[in-house]
Structure formats: C-alpha cells, structure tokens
Amino acid sequence: MYYNKVEICGVNTSTLKVLTDDEKKALLIRVKEGDASARQELIYGNLRLVLSIVQRFTGRKENLDDLFQVGCIGLCKAVDNFNVELDVKFSTYAVPMIIGEIRRYLRDNNSIRISRSVRDLAYKALQAREELTKEKSEEPTIEAIATRLGEKKEVVVRALEAIVEPISLYEPVFTEGGDSIYVLDQISDSSSSDEIWLENIVLREAMKRLSAREQKIIYMRYYMNKTQMEIASEIGISQAQVSRLEKAALKQMKTQM
C-alpha cells in the first residue's frame, strides 16, 4: 500500500465503516455475551483505527500489508480483553494494544539479535503484565510482574529494556479529539536550572539594546547557526559588514552583561 492507493490486504479503505462510541459499547456488550457476529462487526468497524496506526510506521520501509495484519491481531486482542465495566473508551484501550503488537513484530524481525532466553523472559513479563492488568484493572508495578514470574526485579527490567525499540520524540503516545501528546511532551528538562534561566533573562535584556540589524545578525548567527556569508546574502550586505556588525554587537552585549 502507498499513499496513492486505497487498498490494503484486499480491503478498500475508503469504504471502511466508522462506529460511534455508543455503537462500540453496544457491540462490546454483545461480544462479552458470546455473540460472534458482533465481534466481527466490531473488528471491521475499527479497521480504520488500525490503518491510522500503521501509517505511523511508513518510514520504516516495512510491508504495510504485513503491518496491517499484525495490527488487526492487536485489535482482536483488544476486543477480546476489553472490560466493558471500566469507564474507558475502547480506542483508548485498543491503541496501545495495536501498537504493542506491531512493535513486537518489528522487534522479532529486527537485525539486532537478542538472546532467546532474554526475549522469552521479556515476552513472559509482557504477558504477566496483561494478566495482572486484567485481574486488578490497573497497571501493575514491575515488582508485581517479577513476583508473578518468580524472577528478580532487575532481571525483568533488563529483559524488557532489551526488547524496547527506539522511538521518535515526536511519536504520539495518546490522541483524543484531534489533539496529540507526544513522547517529547513527557520528558522533563533538568538542564533548565535557575542559573541558566537568569542568564537567559540577562541575555535577552542585552539583546534589546542592540539595533534591529544587529539583533537580526546575532539571532541568525547564534540561534539559527547560519554563516556570515549566508547572513550577508539574506540581508543584502557584504560578509565584511556582517563581521564588523557581529563583533560590535557582541562587544556591546558583553559590556551590558
């Protein structure tokens, strides 16, 4: 599948049905009662969700038909394990399940090989996490997972870390109503100390005392990492003039700071 096509795994994506939250809830209740037709309808009605997740992995040059099928396995697991009594949207529960299934597939096909024993322990830990989550209706701690497996906490942590695939800082971890929370949003910056914060204030005050042209040169030179030749070409003066203005501006800022 490529962007100019609408068919994946023999499914015309333009005709996929989109279920409302009420329809999903009604179907999920029927699924729990053993209604096979409701299960099939629910799965088919969420194929667009799988497709949207698969498209996040297009840059990996993987076969998207394969990823779509693997994503559907994650969707089936989400349908079969979803607890209708919890006040959680089905998509909120299904998205991590689908992504997890795709990542497991990618890890298994990764060129970086991990020992079989470590991989097996990691998958047992993931299975134990799913079981504990289902039993307790909450995310289990790593200690609880290790206890379930009869392993040391440190051993389980190392096994799970071994199969973790690097992800982009701009990969969405949650999407609701069109607004996404990215990995980057979950990372704190311990480098922003009070001292650096104060230095930035002093620097901004010193910049304000420069002329408009000097401010532009300093900004382009040290914030945009442009060369003097690039700056000269952009603002229409010679490289020698840029050099003189930059030196004068830095000298003035140093005096002010």
Image (cartoon, rainbow, N blue to C red):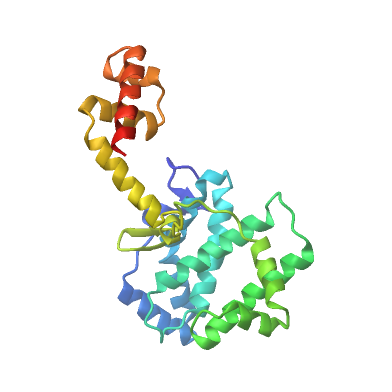
Q: Is residue 141 above or below residue 67?
A: below
Q: Residue 179: percent from the left, percent from the top?
A: 32, 59
Q: Nearer the viewer, residue 61 or 242?
A: 242
Q: Residue 252: percent from the left, percent from the top?
A: 29, 29
The answer to which quarter of the image holds residue 210 is top left
Q: Is residue 105 left or right of residue 10?
A: right
Q: Is residue 246 above or below residue 12?
A: above
Kindly identify the residue that appears in the image at 25 percent across and 41 percent down.
Answer: 205
Q: Residue 169: percent from the left, percent from the top?
A: 47, 52
Q: Is residue 18 above or below residue 60?
A: below
Work out which quarter of the rendered image holds the C terminus and state it.
Answer: top left
Q: Is residue 223 left or right of residue 57?
A: left
Q: Nearer the viewer, residue 226 or 99?
A: 226
Q: Residue 44: percent from the left, percent from the top?
A: 44, 66
Count of marks overlaid on the render: 0
The answer to which quarter of the image holds residue 188 is bottom left
Q: Nearer the viewer, residue 16 or 108?
A: 108
